[in-house]
Image (spheres, helix red, strand yellow):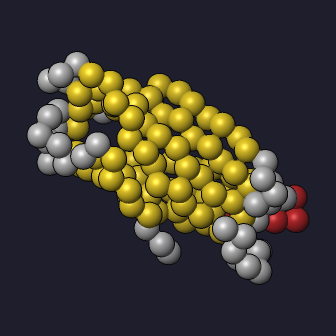
Amino acid sequence: MIEYTLTTNFVEVTVLPIYIEEQSIPYENCYVWMYNVKIKNKSQSTIQLLSRHWQIIDYKGKVNEIAGVGVIGEQPVIKSGEVFKYTSGTYLNVPSGIMQGKYEFLNEESIKVFEVMIPPFSLDSPYIKTRPH
């Protein structure tokens, strides 16, 4: 398993994708992953996660965009030096793809909204012979 990490605007995002064999049904073109996300506030300010925007791109190039308020029903406030963790999931109709995206945060001291990039990460199942990305 590979962790993917990217720091933007003093916020470090680490993602660990995991293929879920038990929930996948390859003969019905259903491949399922969970991904663990860790968001570390490396700034001196308290920040709040406002929204997310994901791009899920399968290896054939089909793009699915997902946007919404917060993550897993929360808009967490993360103090300087603290970490927020959550787990979510996705599926594809093909055995491989990538996910990437961004979060929108509020700096509670300056009252400014800023973006934090989510590192692109591979969604690979054992049903693909070579990595397409």
Residue 130 drawn above or below residue 132: below
Kindly identify the residue that appears in the image at 76 percent across and 75 percent down: 128
Between 102 and 128, which is closer to the camera in this rendering?
Answer: 102
Query: Closest to the observer: 65 or 73?
Result: 65
Position of 24 compared to 9: left or right? right
Q: Is residue 59 above or below residue 76?
A: below
Which residue in the rendered view is the most extreme toward the top? 111
Residue drawn at x 55%, y 65% as measured from the top left: 18
Q: Can you say whether 80 is above or below 76 in the image?
A: below
Query: Which residue in the rendered view is the most extreme toward the bottom?
Result: 129
Total count of labels: 0
Image point (74%, 55%), residue name: 58
Residue at left offset 52%, top offset 44%: 101
Q: Position of residue 117 (x, y in %)?
A: 43, 45
Which of the pair 117/18 is nearer the observer?
A: 117
Residue 44 in percent (x, y) is at: 11, 40
Q: Position of residue 79 (x, y in %)?
A: 16, 38
**Residue 124 seen anywhere in this rendered image of the structure:** yes
Residue 80 place in picture, x, y as percent: 14, 42
In which quadrant of the rendered view does residue 78 lie?
A: top left
Tell whether 123 sits left or right of 71.
Answer: right
Is residue 84 among the parts visible in the rendering? Answer: no
Q: Quadrant where the C terminus lies?
A: bottom right
